[in-house]
Amino acid sequence: MTETLLRGRLLTFHREPADATDTDAYTYIEDAGLLIEDGVIAAAGSYAEIAARAPAAAVVDHRPHLMMAGFIDTHLHFPQVQVIASWGAQLLDWLNHYTFPEETRFADADHCARMAAAFLDQLTDNGTTTAVAFCSVHAASADALFAEATRRNMRMLGGKVMMDRNAPDGLRDTPQTGYDDSTALIARWHGQGRNGYVITPRFAITSTPEQLDMAGALAAEHPDCHIQTHLSENHAEIAYTAELYPEARDYLDVYERHGLLGPKTLLGHAIHLNPREVDALAATGARPVFCPTSNLFLGSGLFDEARLRSRGITSGIATDVGAGTSYSMLQTLNEGYKVLQLQGQALHPMRAFHWATRGNAAVLGLEDRIGTLDPGTEADIVVLNARATDAMALRAERASTLAEELFILQVMGDDRAVEEVYVAGVPRKTRAKMPGAEVRAPEPA
Ligand code: GUN
Ligand code: ZN
């Protein structure tokens, strides 16, 4: 048994804080010990108490930094690591001009492997320990992602996109091959180690009704798999979907008719919803996912979190790289704060940090395994430094409460504020940017 004892300040959430005064929603310990045994959190409490219990443990002193559960990113695209920051287009043009051509490169297994390593390095350097990823149409892209995640013992959810129309040559499957490839990937990876397969029809525009039937069949055959797709991101997308599915009552109804909605369904964006669609989200328990940096970057619109919350609908929050502009969940919370500000909705930092950790875990139904620092859960941990830059340190001189410190991290933080990341108890922050350090994803010769 390997025992590691982390020392530092500790914050973990038990439920979503109702407001800034809701101190029962979390535990904060000024001088804490976090005991890790074989990749699992064995104990958390005051340092003196935990150290007495584990005298032989190797101690890593992270004081004065803040230990939290690792961040969870509930929607992003692994094959878009070289699409991020592509200029000047809204959704459909952005897909056709930048994204689809780049995704065709994932037909090459060597490219997939190199990008998978680079992708997971970016996630962990930013403090993200679990992600829900869209792969490309190629089964090899999902194989590469899961193989690399397995090597790192990282809890990873993902799936190959099913897309059989309105995409270029080399980037379309068929209803049958999409079904067969997904079935084989589920057999290979779902529930293997920390991997979970996600049935992934890309969105209504790139799937025929026959393909969505097959996706619905997969969902019925594998009820423990998540499902992910996109919903009502952009007005042109919604109009085109209505043309392609004239019998559907609205965009969400396309997915509803094909048996794709339930509590394990993740719907990226969900911005422009009519009242019937909100009713159907509430009735089915499907989960909208807010992608603020992407929604601003593509000019898609403003996600109305309060409207959904008022109906008991719980949303995830995510980067949506590569339409999203940062791998950092801190920067995602920053832009999320601003999108909600534009609608008169204040996102308190306590709620924000709950959202990126236990909140997103609960959206995935995984809060008993990840998203907290509770004993018995997996030791995925981020160590944050609110004084990581000169500008942050200057601001922090005038901060006296935990909420103020968190808000500095939320607004000014990024990968520089991530001191260390533990994935199943193993430190994973790469030092590749430092002179002489190992470069994990070298250019091919
Ligand atoms: N809708 C369908 N595919 C995509 C994608 O790759 N990114 C975004 N932002 N929206 C999509
Ligand atoms: Zn997306």
Image (cartoon, grey):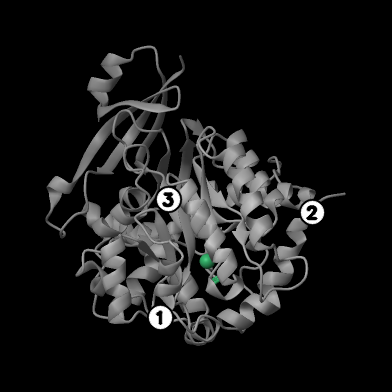
Residue 430, by quadrant, is top right
Quick one: 221 or 64, which is closer to the camera? 221
Q: Residues within 10 Å of mark 1 (few under 14, many from 20)?
A: many
Left/right placement of residue 114 relative to residue 219 reads right
Left/right placement of residue 292 relative to residue 89 reads left
The residue that appears at 31% across and 62% down in the rendered structure is: 284
The residue that appears at 60% across and 83% down in the rendered structure is: 89
Q: Residues within 10 Å of mark 2 (few under 14, many from 20)?
A: few
Which numbered disc, 3 or 1, marks the residue that appears first in the sequence? 3
Cα gap from disc 3 to disc 1, whole angstroms = 30 Å
Q: Position of residue 408 (x, y in %)?
A: 34, 60
User: Amino acid type of disc 1?
Assistant: Asp
Q: Nearer the viewer, mark 3 or mark 1?
A: 1
Q: Could you say which disc has been placed on residue 72 in the image? A: 3
Q: Secondary structure at mark 1?
A: loop
Q: Position of residue 388 (x, y in %)?
A: 44, 53
Q: Secondary structure at mark 3?
A: strand
Q: Nearer the viewer, mark 1 or mark 2?
A: 1
Which numbered disc, 2 or 3, marks the residue that appears first in the sequence? 3
Q: Secondary structure at mark 2?
A: loop
User: Amino acid type of disc 2?
Assistant: Asp
Q: Which residue is mark 1?
A: 250
Q: Quadrant of the N terminus?
A: top left
Which numbered disc, 1 or 2, marks the residue that appears first in the sequence? 2
Q: Is residue 343 above or below residue 321?
A: below
Q: Which residue is mark 2?
A: 108
